[in-house]
Each structure stands twice: as C-alpha cells, then as structure tokens.
Amino acid sequence: MAEYLNKNNFYAGADYGLDPDFGKGESFLGFETSYRTPASQIGITTDARSANQLGEVSKKLSTGVKTIELGSISNEVWESVPKHQLKEINRLKKLTGVDLTLHGPLVEPTGVSRQGWDESQREQSERQMWSAVQRAQNLDPDGNVVVTFHSSNGLPTPETSVFNEKTKKEEIKEFWVVDERTGNFQNVQIEKNYFEGQTQPYTKDGIIVELKKKNEDAWNKALQSVSFHAHNGSSIVRQVIGKEAEEEGKEGDETKDDSKKRQEYILEYYKKYGTPEGEKVIKNAGPYGDVTRKSMQELVHGELYLRDAYGDLRNLFNQAYEAAKINKDEKTLEKLDSYIKEISPKVKDIRNPEKIHELATEIINGINVLKSIDAPKTFTPLRDFAIKNASETISNVAMNAYNEFKDKAPLISIENPPAGMGLSRAEDLKDLIVASRKKFVEKAKENGMSESQAKDHADKLIGATWDVGHINMLRKFGYGEKELLEETGKIAKYVKHVHLSDNFGLEHTELPMGMGNVPIKKEMEILNEYNKKAKKIIETGGNWYQFFQKSPLRETLEAFGSPIYGMKMQSYWNQVPVMSGGYFAGQGATLPDIHFQTYGTGFSGLPTELGGQIGGRSRVSGNPME
C-alpha cells in the first residue's frame, strides 16, 4: 500500500536507507554527486507557435528556471515577432538574471527542395538564417547567445541503414544520389550482385564502389550511343561521296584525282540540294536525275546521324568539363582544354554542308578524347552534396556574424533532426561541423586573419546541439543502447548545447526525461567529459502539454537528480516523492503518529480509491483523483 500511496502523492512514510533497492530506480538517485546536473543548467523552451514571445518568456520565468530558449520553428511565426519584443526580453533577462538562447526557424540549409536543388534556394535559406542570428543578438548584445539550427529540414535521409541484430552489423539498404549539373535526385536500391560476387551487406565503402560503377556504366552507354550514330552517319557519307576511293587511291577505273573531283561536285551540288536551282539541275539531268536525287537523300540521312551525334558529343563534353571543374580534376581539364583548342577553328564550318565529311572526322576524334578520360562523377552521393552546400550556408552565416558583432557574435549550433531525416546521425553532424569550420577558416584568412585565430573563432562560433530524443529514434531501425551511446561519443566534443526529450524510439513523442528509454545517465556521462556546463533545454512538444496540462520541469529535475539548493547539497529533486516521510531517520517508528494524524484510525481516512474519503491529486497528471 505504501508504494501505491507514494505514486499517487499520498503520504507513504519514509523510505528506508537500509533497503537494498533504495536508489536503484531510473532517476539519478544513487549516482555520484559529480553526475548530478544543477538546476541552473536546465532550461525550458517557449511555445514556438506563438509570436508573443515576450508573454511566453514571462510565463516561463514564473517556473524559476535560469535558462529560457525562445522557440521559432516556423519562419512565418518568427517574422511575426515584433523587434521591440526582443529588446524587452533582454531587459527581463537583466532584471532576472536568466540566460537566453534561440531555436532558429526550420530551414533547409542545403538549398534542396522537392523540385531538386537550386543555388538560389540555398541563398534564400542563408538569408533566413542570417536574419535569425541578427535578431538573436538583441536578446543578449553583450554575450554569445546560442542559436540552434537543424542540419536539415525536408532533406531525405541520404542513406537508409538498418541494424541487423543477427550479424550485429549496420546494413545500407538504399542511398540517394544527385546530378550536380541538373540538381535532380535519384534513389539507388542496393541489390546483391551475384554475377560479380557482391552478396555481402553494403557499407559506406560499398556505396563508393556502387556509385563508381553507376557513373562508368552511364558514361559508357552515352559514348556508345554517340559512337553508333557517328559510325552510321560516317559510313553513309563515305559511301555517297566516295571517301574510300580517296583513301585507297582508286575505285575501279576511277583515279584519285577523278574521285576528288567527284566528291567536290557532289558536295557542291549537295549545298544546293532542296533549292529551286538544285531541282532544276536534277530535272535537266535526264536519266541520271533519279540517281542523283537518291544520293542526295542518302547524304541527308547520313548528315542527320552526324548532327545528332555532334549534339550528344557536345553535351557529353560539357558534362565532363563541368564535373572536372567541380571535382578539381586538373588532369582531365588539361585534356579537354587541349581538344577545345583543336576544334575551335573548325566549329564555324561544322554546319556547312560542304564540310560534312570533316564533321564525321571531328566527332570520331571527340569520342576518342572522351574515352581517354575517367568517367565523370555525374552522380554524387546526396550526403556529400548536402554537407558541401549546408557547410557553405553555415560558414557564411558564421562569418557574417563575426564581421558584424566580433567577439560578441552569436554561436551557431547545429542540431541533429529526428533519426530517419537527412543528416541526422552523429557522423553526419560531425562532418558538417568540420566542413563548416574549415570553410570559415578559409574565408577568414581571405579577410586577413591568421590561420590560428581563424581556427579559434571557428571552434567557438560553430558547434553542435545534441538532441537525445531525436537520436533515440534510431531504435525503430533496430539499433540498441550500445549504438546510441556510440553516436553520442562521436559528437560529444563538438556539443555546445543539449536538447532534452524522451521517447521509446518509435515516435517523436517528446516526453520529459525519465519517462521513456533514452539512456540519459550514460549519455550525460559521455557529454560531461567535454562540456559539463552546456545548457540543457527541455523540449517537450505539444503532446505532453496537451495530455497532462503541466510543465515538465519538475519531472526533468527529478530525472537529473538536481540539487534543490544552490549550494549543490542535499536535498535533491529526485528525493521529492519521498520527502514527506516521517520525522525519523533509518528504520523509523513502526507506527509513527503522523500516520494516525493524516489518515485517522478508521477506514474513512483512506483514499477514495480504497473506499475512504480523503482525496488528492495525481503526481503524474496533477489532476484530482475521484
């Protein structure tokens, strides 16, 4: 009965210090004091659906928290927050001593949309992020306010991976690629290649091999098509104008000079073919008119093949050149530039009917050049493409922030979205941060900053927000606690900020900590090795407030074993449920007076659920018990 009463906020008597199960629950009770988290490091977010952020901050201040994060998930709502409100919020900060952070609006920093990728879309996202950073400066002009942005918003997961519980290995089932020239995406399904012996689960290295084959196959098919058309067209032209005779010296009784004259005559006439003058010549040719007309028709057929081949060759050449520029392939660029110099003087004559035989020769030469280079990387892994473009956006925003605000610039903190979305894994987040810092250093050096200074500023201005609830959703892909902790270990040294929400790994439910299966104790142990003072913001979404109508603050403080008093000594928040115990320590009195004072000596003093008359409020929901 004591256990029942305790769970429902009734007096349950004191827990016994000699109980072997004491302190082994899911809270931090029983942990070393060094792992407890001070309440000053735990903050709460405002309602991101409201443009009245001043009113939201005022409400959150009444909870007593020391850190408040302004939510601005929707860019439309964030743009509706009047600028004077942010300055008023800064005044409240000065009056109350709270710390402020900002969750920036959800934008796609890569520039990817449902229609594909577009550089102008990336630039628009960059402007939205920069606007949020500029406005965030109003919250704390004298400090480095943390501004969180998601690594992606709407980007499909570049690689769909599952964890095979039998083999204990990660398997990649499919991945996305992008054609950088067009911005179009394509999904590549991983299939076992029995013909070439590839029957093992695909890894990241396997993706590189698969993509190389895909690029080579696409390139070879394209060259084959051009070659086929060029060969057909060239054969027809040679047959009609007697090109074979020119090369071999004779064709029957025809001399080489006669053959050349015949070619010149045919090409000169072909130039007039289809005009009134040409039709007149055919009409006056008598019995030879039909033969001439047939030869001209064959030449038209051959030229169409060659023109088609030339157009495809030009497109392939441009594709190879663009890919070589993107990948900085100097060797390939050198070969292609050499061919440009060779063909440039002849381009003006390509459409001249008299030069049709030269057109065939140049197409064959061009095909040989394209065959001699490596297959261009037409398709790039979406992951690499996304990191390249997102890092450009993030580094530009950070650089703008430093240029305008110097040492007081806001800090750009990149958050992992829910597992299953683009760039949601620790490795993705780490690589994005490293790439963003590297580009920041390059931009800063161009502005005259030393490399060491640039690296220091990059490390300070660009970091990670680690959402423990988002990464926990890897469980729905078969991953377990071991793999979750490995994810935290990969990103730990980059983490500047932590978002707290719990779930059971299948849905983005955002419960208070301790109410799902996020291994928060072990995760905090890993994170504390690098940044023990990182702010931890409670992110419980609409479901918790909708269903339970209460703040998640107390439950979170209990889960973290936070000290109730500022001197970080006993008592702790996770002891709150048992703090109504008797006045005796240790085993306590067998029948202390407090029992009788509270419940009396009859059944009427029992809770209503047990047939008595005493009501109360549920500890979980806070609602009256009837």
Image (spheres, grey):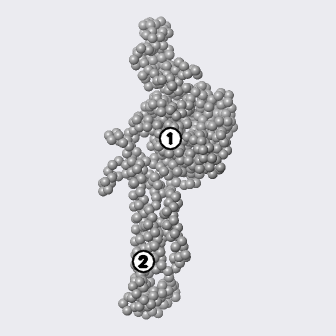
Residue 319 visible here: no
Find residue 469 and report its horizontal and vertical position in percent: 47, 35
Name the amino acid, label 2: Ser
Q: Is residue 102 above or below residue 567?
A: below
Find residue 408 and report its horizontal and vertical position in percent: 65, 39
Question: Residue placed at 40% from the left, 65% from the top?
Answer: 221
Question: Closer to the camera, 385 or 88?
Answer: 385
Q: Residues within 10 Å of mark 2 (few under 14, many from 20)?
A: many
CA–CA distance between discs 1 and 2? 58 Å
Dividing the image into 4 quarters, which one contains the N terminus?
Answer: top left
Question: Residue placed at 51% from the left, 65% from the top?
Answer: 334
Question: What element does badge 2 sit on?
Answer: helix
Question: Residue 443 vs residue 466: left or right?
Answer: right
Residue identified by numbered label 1: 416
Q: Is residue 320 above or below residue 403?
A: below
- Residue 234 marker: 2
The reply to whether dot 1 and dot 2 touch (C-beta < 8 Å) is no
Residue 566 visible here: yes
Name the amino acid, label 1: Asn
Question: Residue placed at 44% from the left, 25% from the top?
Answer: 26
Question: Closer to the camera, 338 or 464?
Answer: 338
Q: Is residue 159 above or below residue 299?
A: above
Question: What element does badge 1 sit on?
Answer: loop
Find residue 445 and report its horizontal and vertical position in percent: 62, 49
Count of labels in the image: 2
Question: Residue 160 vs residue 459: left or right?
Answer: left
Question: Residue 441 vs residue 225: left or right?
Answer: right
